[in-house]
Image: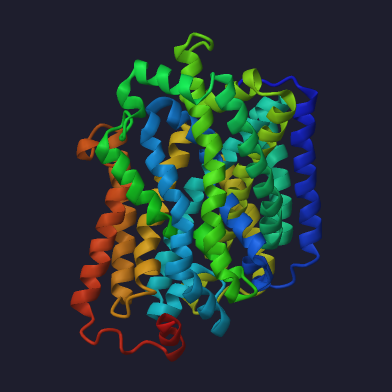
Amino acid sequence: MPIINSPLIIFCVVSYLALCFGIGIWAMRRTHSSSDFFLAGKSLGPVVVVFATMSSIMSGFGFVGGPGLVFESGASSFWMTFAATFSMPLGAVLVGKRLRLMAETREILTLPDAVAARYGGRWPRAAMALAILLGVLGYLGTQVMAIGIVLVAVLGVDLPVALLIGLGVLAFYSIAGGIMAGVYTDLFQGALMIGASLAVFSYAISSAGGLDQIGTTLWQMDASFLGPWGTRGPMMSLSWFVLFLIGGVGQPHGITKFMMLKNIGNLKWVGLLTGPCYAVLSLLWVSIGLSMRTLVEQGVQAPLDSPDLAAPVFLLNYAPEWLAGVVFAALLAAIMSTADSFLNLGAASVVRDIPTALLGRPLERELFWSRIATGVILVASAVFALYMENLIALLGTFGWGTFAAAIFPSIAIGLNWKRANGAACVASISVSILLNFALELSAKYGLYQLPYGMNVGCFSLLASLLVFIGVSWFSSPDGGTDLPADVNAAMDV
């Protein structure tokens, strides 16, 4: 990313960081218990939950990797954005009400808590906690590196200094205020991201000569680019559709927000509004990618060294300075909103879920150790990020697919099918983790690659679903009649 020498852009980004710091101070005064730290005291209204959910799902992948993906493969990624628009509404329907009802009758603060209530025993909780922790460490590392890259460009400092500044702000409001600080920061971040997306869409389309000119130029370049499958082909496009539609219900940083609602009756508004909000955010994703590819094909813009530079090059060369400042702040917001959700999930796994699975109880002084764990995970992810390569590729579909394959069957199917059991939960999570990492590593080192361009995350998700359904069907002859009364009642709603 090129270095920015604009006082206005620097002012926008520094002002955003200062605001996050202020929200951390405010939230710290309202965080008094582990329920406050992990679920914001189950006190949030629908508007806050909608913006928090949307902000955490639309990470740096959407604001940086998304335009680069459109620039490279055209309509292929439309299958991703279209599907993701419906994933959180689908999650509200499939799991939102049941998760919130279970959190009302039991002390359920995390997804592993919900899994333990649904299936009983320690192993389902341990498997879910481990899957979340592994996903958090890898996914968070990419977010941390993205924070550093943006601040290197904006402030013109070395990467370690940029990481120190960005992570210092993130650490303060995440450690001090927990998810309370995170969701109210997300409220501002979400509004900023929506405004930026609408403005960028208008400027991006006009800078390339309008929709007709974009369509004509790209069709003449390569008809498949704007065809139904883009340049990636039908198998990749359809596997992205499946992964981002039903896999969204397996994103822990999204579906845990349902448990934070103060009034369960407001869940319908969360389901109705998250989809349209995500669709608006996708306008930035699509418009910059198409416009920059058009400008390159027209010879107006020199070829890019990397597709991931599509967004920053557009902002620096074709957008007004004030808009570039707002969008760079929104870019940082998208990354940090996802990072703070991951920090909260990771701390819960370390302090609450894994100790409860192994020892039968969470650590004493849970709030204190949650703050310590948040800091440790942040430092560990920063060290991990400094040694990573190929940031945006890792940031995208692999992270989403890892969570989707491990979590969707046990949560989305398990909370709607009484025959599902703990053995199926453990087996499906184990299979998903092994397949995701084994197939990614074998493809990276040229050992084996899935045929026809099928996405690894989608394949692992489908395999995990088959294992979950098969094990449940053949090992539960009673059909789930031994469920606790409160869980049974929640599933009957």
Q: How is the image coloured?
A: rainbow
Residue pushed farthest top?
299
Q: Is residue 146 left or right of residue 126?
A: right
Asked whether residue 419 appears in the rendered view, the answer is: yes
Please determine whether, in this image, residue 243 is positioned above or below residue 161: below
Residue 86, picture quadrant: bottom left
Total count of labels: 0
Q: Nearer the viewer, residue 323 or 2?
A: 323
**Quadrant of image for the C terminus:** bottom left
**Where does the image place residue 123, in percent across and percent down from the top left?**
38, 73
State the image quarter where residue 318 is shown.
top right
- Measured along the vertical axis of the image, is residue 52 above or below residue 141? below
Q: Residue at x 47, y 11 (%)?
A: 298
Quadrant including the N terminus? top right
Which residue is found at the position 79% from the left and 27% from the top? 8
Give the residue at the far front of this rendering: 212
Q: Does residue 315 appear left or right of residue 432 in this picture?
A: right
Query: Looking at the image, which is closer to me, 116 or 72?
Result: 72
**Left or right relative to 361: residue 365:** right
Where residue 121 appears, as percent x and y from the top left, is 39, 80
Q: Is residue 455 visible?
A: no
Judge by depth and name the residue closer to the eye, 356 or 49: 49
How far across and down, in percent of the image, does residue 290 sit?
47, 26
Image coordinates for residue 53, horizontal then vertical, percent: 57, 56
Compared with 242, 282 (above or below) is: above
Name the residue rendered at 35%, 72% in the picture: 414
Residue in the picture at 74% in, 35% down: 13
Where is residue 31, by image quadrant?
bottom right
